[in-house]
Every structure is written in C-alpha cells, then in structure tokens.
C-alpha cells in the first residue's frame, strides 16, 4: 500500500479505524519552526466526530500526542511522529458486514486486492485515516505562515443547495430522517501563494492537488478555476488578461484558478472537491453477499450522513502539504527556515 505522500515534505499515515491508534510520521519539515500543539488540536477538533447531529456520533477526543521531532515547541528537523489513540470501539456494529460487502464501499476491493480486510470500521479505507493528514497539514500550515500563505476551505454545496448553510443543514437533516446520506462540495482558496511553484510536465501543481484531493476518502471530483464550465466558454471569455497592479504583472480575472501551464501565477489558487454520499446507510438495500446470495443490508454503525462536512480541514491539510512540498522543491533548500527564506530570494507577491 502507498501510505506516503510528498517528495520533500513527506507524510506517512498509519492506523486503522478500530486499531489502537492512528497518526502520522512527517519527514522533511524544516528545522527551528515554531509549532503550536494547540493549532494542531484545533484542526483535529474541526474533523472530530460527535460534534453535532450532522456528523457520526462516535465519541472520540482525538487528542494529538507528539512523540518526536519537536522539542520546546520547535521542530528539530528530524521525523515528527504524532499519534491519536482510538477509544470508542464498537466492532459488533460491523458484524453484519463480515460476509456482505457494503455497496460503493471499499470492503469488496480491499478484500479482492489483499485477500483480507479489517474486521471492523473500514480499516484504512475509513475516514478516520484522515487524522494523520490533518496533523501533517496543520504542521505544514504553520510552516507556510512564515511566508504569509493562508489556506481556507468551506462547504459550498450539499445536495442541490449551494452557498446557504441553513438550507444545506436541512438537506443533511432530511437525509438523516430517511436513514440515508447525501453528497457535498468543498471549495478551497489558497492565498498569497507566490508565482513559480509547480513543475512541468507531470508534476503540475494542479495535478498534484488533484491527486491529493482525490486520495481523500469519498472524494469523487476535482476542478480548479473555471473547471468544467470552461468547456462551454469561448477563449475570449475565458482568457485571464494581464494588467499591471502595484508594479507587478497580474490578471484581471482568475479563470485559471491561480495556475497556468501547471505553475502558479501569483493569483489565488481556487479549486473545488466533490464528495459522494456516505456509502454506509441505515436504509435497507437489496444487495449480494460474497456467496452471491441476495440479502437485505441495513447499516447499524455510526456513520456521517454527509462526509463532506468533516472533510473541510482534510482538504485544507492536503492543500498545505502540496504547497509546502512545492515550495521546498522550488529551491531545494536545506532544513533551516532562515536558509529557506534566504534561498527563496524573491519577495512574496501577496494576492488580493
């Protein structure tokens, strides 16, 4: 299994949904960076289960414990290991799935590939694996803050409803009342990203972002800038015309989403990620077990009615990991943050 992401800033996540713990090992983080455990915990709390009736009611504190790589609040330049212990186990909730692969879940494909699967909780396919991503992303965002780079994401659509959180909540509540689930879209904006990040031809920054986002459990779609809508536009409508702003060449519009030719152009990076409805639902479904016999399946466990809600900090985390990795690759810097700033050797052009 490929459990490591990144080339210089590398993150390996570990643990299964119902194992003793989950977490991440981060290698390649520059040394002497101030790291706040509180900021890591803040991001973990945003994806923590049981925080509202719109999420799974699994009761986990999701408390991060840094085992190595940070001393007196500063990075050492050595691997950073962080673990979150699992506490709220209910393996009996998954007994009915032992011989029935859940429709649209990874149960079937994991067993096909490995010949064995975790007996409960979805194993590595569970959204609980994303804890390690959020930890690494929270650290990456603290490094990027030294360059003024900010990354924020939000829910932009649930079901057919767009940009109205009150109505979107009602869509989720309706799905819950029907023992069903519903999909959603997350929009992310990365501000103050300098021009010149990303590499042709196969490591274009939007290609790296797409890989990062589509690796998140339940992610099914990625678009950057004008995305799919660009297919119905004319070049005269879509082209981002150049203008001079404060002595810097910029663009009037941002249909490119901050990326041209796979390389950042100094504008905000803007992209969206689509998430499918949660596969495990309480509504009875006719499906087949591993023996091919037709059975009625009803999910008895605790599952998110809309996985996109808790995926917001995961999207931010993966974006931070990609941008930091590209930043470090750009100058092939050593592990000292002061050297990083020196070798970067250009003024950061801040996006409006």
Image (cartoon, grey):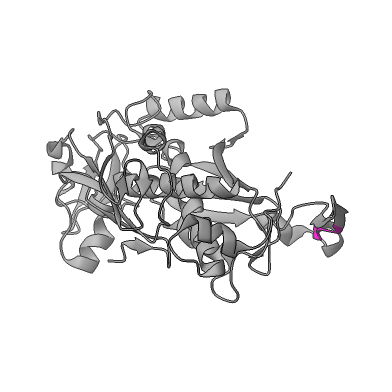
Vertical position of residue 180 compared to residue 78: above or below:
above
Q: Is residue 276 visible?
A: no
Vertical position of residue 24 compared to residue 278: above or below:
below
The N terminus: image quadrant: bottom left
Q: Position of residue 104 (x, y in %)?
A: 35, 52
Identify the image quadrant of residue 251: bottom right
* Left or right of residue 79, residue 116 in this image: left
Please give the name of the residue rendered at 26% of the width and 30% of the height, measured from the top-left corner. Answer: 61
Identify the image quadrant of residue 160: top right
Please give the name of the residue rendered at 15% of the width and 44% of the height, measured from the top-left corner. Answer: 20
Main SS class of the magenta portion in the image: loop
Q: Is residue 53 visible?
A: yes
* Left or right of residue 117, residue 206 in this image: right
Q: Is residue 103 magenta?
A: no
User: 212 or 111, which is in the foreground?
Assistant: 212
Q: Position of residue 96 (x, y in %)?
A: 16, 43
User: 115 or 80, which is in the foreground?
Assistant: 80
The C terminus: image quadrant: top right
Q: Position of residue 295 (x, y in %)?
A: 21, 47
Please give the name of the residue rendered at 54% of the width and 71% of the height, measured from the top-left corner. Answer: 203
Q: Which span is picked out in magenta? A: 238-242
């Amino acid at each position: 299994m490929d459990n490591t992401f990144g080339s210089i800033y590398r993150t390996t996540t570990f643990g299964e949904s119902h194992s003793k713990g989950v977490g991440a090992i981060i290698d390649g983080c520059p040394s002497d960076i101030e790291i706040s455990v509180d900021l890591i915990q803040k991001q973990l709390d945003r994806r923590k289960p049981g925080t509202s009736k719109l999420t799974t009611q699994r009761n986990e504190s999701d408390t991060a414990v840094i085992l190595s790589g940070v001393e007196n609040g500063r990075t050492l330049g050595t691997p950073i290991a962080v673990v979150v212990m699992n506490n709220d186990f209910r393996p009996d909730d998954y007994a009915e799935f032992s011989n029935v692969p859940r429709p649209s879940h990874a149960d079937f494909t994991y067993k096909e590939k490995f010949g064995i699967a975790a007996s409960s909780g979805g194993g590595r396919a569970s959204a609980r694996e994303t804890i390690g991503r959020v930890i690494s992303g929270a650290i990456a965002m603290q490094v990027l803050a030294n360059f003024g780079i900010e990354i924020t994401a939000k829910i932009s659509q649930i079901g057919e409803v767009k940009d109205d959180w009150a109505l979107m909540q009602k869509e989720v509540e309706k799905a819950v009342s029907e023992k069903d689930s519903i999909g959603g879209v997350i929009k992310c904006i990365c501000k103050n990203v300098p021009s010149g990040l990303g590499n042709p031809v196969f490591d274009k920054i939007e290609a790296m972002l797409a890989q990062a986002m589509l690796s998140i459990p339940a992610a099914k779609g990625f678009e950057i800038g004008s995305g799919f809508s660009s297919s119905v536009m004319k070049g005269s409508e879509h082209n981002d015309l150049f203008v001079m702003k404060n002595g810097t060449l910029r663009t009037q519009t941002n249909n490119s989403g901050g990326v041209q030719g796979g390389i950042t152009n100094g504008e905000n990076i803007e992209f969206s990620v689509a998430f499918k409805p949660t596969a495990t639902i309480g509504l009875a479904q006719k499906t087949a077990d591993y023996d091919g016999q037709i059975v009625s399946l009803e999910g008895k466990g605790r599952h998110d009615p809309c996985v996109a809600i808790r995926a917001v900090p995961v999207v931010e985390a993966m974006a931070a990991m990609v941008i930091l990795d590209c930043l470090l690759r750009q100058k092939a810097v050593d592990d000292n943050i002061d050297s990083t700033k020196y070798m970067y050797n250009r003024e950061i052009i801040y996006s409006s």
